[in-house]
Image (cartoon, rainbow, N blue to C red):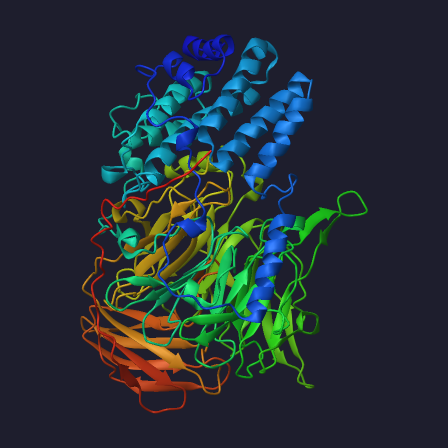
Amino acid sequence: MLPDVLARCLTAVSTLGVLTGGLVFLAACGHPDGHAEHTGPGHEHRVEAADAVVAPAGHREPAASTRAMVERLERLAEEVDHPFNPYARSAVRVAYLRERMEEESDLGEELRLRFLLGKELLSEGSTMAAINEFYQVFAILYPNREHVHPETLLEAWQYLALANLRHGEVQNCLHHHDAESCIFPIAGGGIHRLAEGSRAAIAVYLPLLEAFPDDLSSRYLLNVAYMTLGEYPEGVPGQWRIPPETFASPIDFPRFENIAGGLGIDVDARAGGVVMEDLNGNGLLDLVVSSYGLRDQIRVFLNDGAGGFIDHTAASGLTGITGGLNLVHADSTNNGLPDILVLRGGWEREFGRTPNSLLRNDGGGTFTDVTEEAGLLDFHPTQTAAWADFNNNGRLDLFVGREALLVPGERPGEYRWEGAAGALYRNNGDGTFTDVAAEVGLDVKGYIKAAVWGDYDNDGFMDLFLSNMQGHNYLFRNLGPDGQGHWRFEEVAERAGVHLPVESFTSWWFDYNNNGQLDLFVSGYSATRLGGSLVSRDAALDLLGREREAERLWLYENQGDGTFRDVTAERGLDHVVYTMGANYGDLEGNGWPDIYLGSGEPDFHGIVPNRMFRNDRGRGFQDVTEAGGFGHLQKGHGVAFGDLNHSGALDVYAVIGGVADSDTYPNVLFENPGFGNRWLSVELVGVEAPRTPIGARIEAVIVEGGETRSVFSHLHSGGSFGSAPFRRHLGLGRADRIERLVVRWPGRSGEQVFRDPPFDAAIRIVQGEERFEVLERPSFDYRKDAAVGHEHQRHGGH
């Protein structure tokens, strides 16, 4: 039996029809006066990535090979706009669904199509039109409620509530964006100025929960809705209230302020990757950010060294280079300039046959697309790749993981992989690459979502871990060359104990406990639970400490004998976080790497906080999301830790946004307030090893409070869906002195030891040279006066 208030809402919709702006529903379901501010199609949200930041004057004409890639991407952007492609522009799918509805006479099929249309309109950014479609679904459902399955009714109600909640997000978090917008738990500047969306959502959620009291997703989102109004926790009815202590951090931790708006790097776009690196050799860390769509321009921002950034996109030679769910950088030519690999097609299956791009750094912050001439042009969906010198010849090679699909085989119960195997591109030393995956045993198939290199057994050969979304993970141990000089890899994941979980995503190697051995982080990701309310339900279960069904995080501790032990629970990481972009870095400067996890899913139900876990001196991890202000509710993708202003403390840049057309959000930069700890920045230059010696290990032996301990750092380009500068930042806590610095170069080219390096400084070490060079890198303050109260003015709509 439906509650009276629920029946009243449905009857109002069924009897009176649906009016533009949803005023009938608001009046019938408890809105004080049915009044709606800024409603109607003139205020719909629609923004393109290229509109987010205005570029300064100056333009560099793209090179011929870049123009060829631009033309290829433009053609593909049109080809993938097919109504059967779930990642096509929503306008294409909206038109298709409307055409189908006009032809449909069956009531059940009309209901299904109208519901799908509502979801597509929500993705398009037409929130009021979406709300109206969901109302009309109820106009069909309610008169036939005796024949409607309860789960069908529940799902329809959930999306009606969600559409109203999203409308409030658009009006406030996007149209009137503040540095505190969407930071969970929502408070201060994050409280909505325009209340109608959240009020309407609450009016749906309350009777919904009376009918379905076990719907934890709706209970969680009801609490979020009250937060947006500044009425949490007191305003939430007691039986549905989630106590504030549920979200509280277990320790005090300083708050990190989002200052991206004041610096002009708050690009408002969709899911994408980030590179944080010195692009032009002036010692300053710059940014490159991408956005998922093939019409979304890649953006280049140069650090001006005076607290701000210059939008260098037009002058970079990359005009028209678009898309890229992920970015991975490396100096592939050993010339001291970082090149960038753009990865495309991830998740899109047969519609994801779009090429990657290798962007060669020509110096001065300019680039040329050299994909085809480098031998890297292919058309297989991917979002992960990793650079390393697998054969110790002093050149960086490239592994690209591809997304094959697990499909039924010829016999019942059998399955096979359909799609391309991964590729290992050996660097030929002349700007070209050759795929040798089959020769060395790396022609593996899987739905590969992470590829990360690391010498986990310290034998001087780089090993490769691959996370697999549809099956067990892979660990390929590098066996080195045989008697004929042929290199081989052996798959040892199950033997090593790292084959789980069977649905996984973001991964990386890191030495979380500072014992000199690489440990492994793997995030489970239950893709089979996407597309509805299960993700927000799982998030609520995790926050409440209840048993969950979804895949969790995994932390594997290196045992030093070629095997690993799952220490997730005992280290405090036994959580369900639908991790997408993520990375790690030492926020406190104490030598212990912390973890930041961007989370979410394609559906708008994925309103779950990104999470920050503090490393408690290798003994475990503590959730400091709430205390530090890291709990962004918008979807988190590429993450980078780096010291952008040479303050000696790592800031955190994150790409925010989903894959739907309207699921955009300004990127964030969380400024580190500083902890007063000592530090050392180390830039390594390889000679026998690659110039950027990925895989090198740095050990700082420090004396702290009369005791000696080691801080380890491994050179890499970040987690599988994030970025790290190649200069290594070593937090040294309250050290009294650095006794020695030990550099173990990649391969088998030995170690170097340096005595008594300076504190709070940047140094450069060249392989084989006896002395290090102290670099002049003065600190500077950010120009962040516009960060607080900064608003994005949006125009246009439907």
At x 31%, y 62%, the residue is 309
Q: Residue reaching furthest right?
A: 410
Is 444 placed left or right of 236 in the picture?
right
Towards the viewer: 129 or 335: 129
Is 539 placed left or right of 781 in the picture?
right
Relative to 84, say whether 734 is above or below: below
At x 62%, y 26%, the residue is 113
Coordinates of residue 412 in the picture (x, y in percent):
79, 42
At x 48%, y 46%, the residue is 552
Is 482 placed left or right of 209 in the picture?
right
Quadrant in which residue 518 is drawn: bottom left
Quadrant in which residue 44 is drawn: top left
Towards the viewer: 544 or 229: 229
Relative to 36, say whether 188 is above or below: below
Is residue 250 among the parts visible in the rendering? no
Towards the viewer: 208 or 658: 658
Relative to 636, say whether 460 is above or below: below
Relative to 256, say whether 798 is above or below: above
Quadrant in which residue 199 is drawn: top left
Q: How many marks?
A: 0
Coordinates of residue 359 in the picture (x, y in percent):
52, 69
Coordinates of residue 249 in the picture (x, y in percent):
28, 44
Is residue 80 among the parts visible in the rendering? yes
